[in-house]
Image: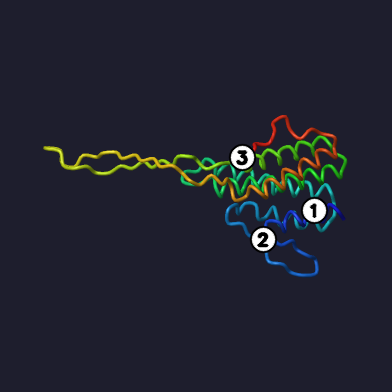
Amino acid sequence: MRLRTLVCVAIAASAIAAAHPAAAAPLPTDQMCPRAVPKIVALNDAAASLDKGKIATAARGAADAYSVCASEAQVAKGVAIEPTVNYDKTRAAQYFVVVGRALAASGNTAEAGAALKTARQYADDVIGWQPESISWHASQTSGGPVAGEGMAPTGGNTAARNPDRDGSRYKDVARQILSAADQELAKLGLAPSSVPAKPN
């Protein structure tokens, strides 16, 4: 029962409704990581079964989907780290905690520990993220006419100090996830990580 509650809380925390067998709930949506939606539906179904193995597998599917979304967003041109990458990492961390709890409940300490440490790493990335202190803008503009050549291109680069040093909007949630991962690791008798959380 505790495991089902944890799964439902993880899903509700991100404003995605868990389906109840007796009532038709709206299908989950996620505009930042659409590939995760079928995995979340599968997790909802697994949670209803109370089968720890199914829950662990389905939660890993959701965690992996958000991991892929984070990786793709991080290298995509024009996609900002905040909010997109930090959102995906926060969601991946959330589901890796569910994976760890389900595996721990099944007695699989080693794999549970690995999943919880992965959750911790993603959460720590979000907690430690800061906007660039300097914002850069590169532009290519047309300059004045040059004799015999028409318009000559000239480059114009500008830099400005970025006053926003508040970190990610997901930082508080990531802190809660990191704390949950550490608590689960402690229950398993495992050290959280050799790398301490970044101070903020």
Residue for point 79% across, 37% down: 113
According to the picture, the residue beneath numbered tag 3 turns out to be 128
Write down the quadrant of residue 24 in the picture. bottom right
Disc 2 residue type (three-letter): Pro
Write down the quadrant of residue 18 in the picture. bottom right
Disc 3 residue type (three-letter): Gly
Residue for point 82% across, 38% down: 186
**188 vs 158, nearest the viewer:** 158
**Mark 2 neighbour class, 10 Å CA radius: few under 14, some 14 to 19, many 20 or more:** some
**19 vs 2, nearest the viewer:** 2
In the image, residue 140 lies at what x, y percent?
30, 42
Earlier-in-chain disc, 2 versus 1 = 1
In the image, residue 179 lies at what x, y percent?
75, 44
Earlier-in-chain disc, 3 versus 2 = 2
Label 2 close to label 1 by CB (< 8 Å): no
Residue that extends furthest to the bottom in the rendered view of this protein: 23
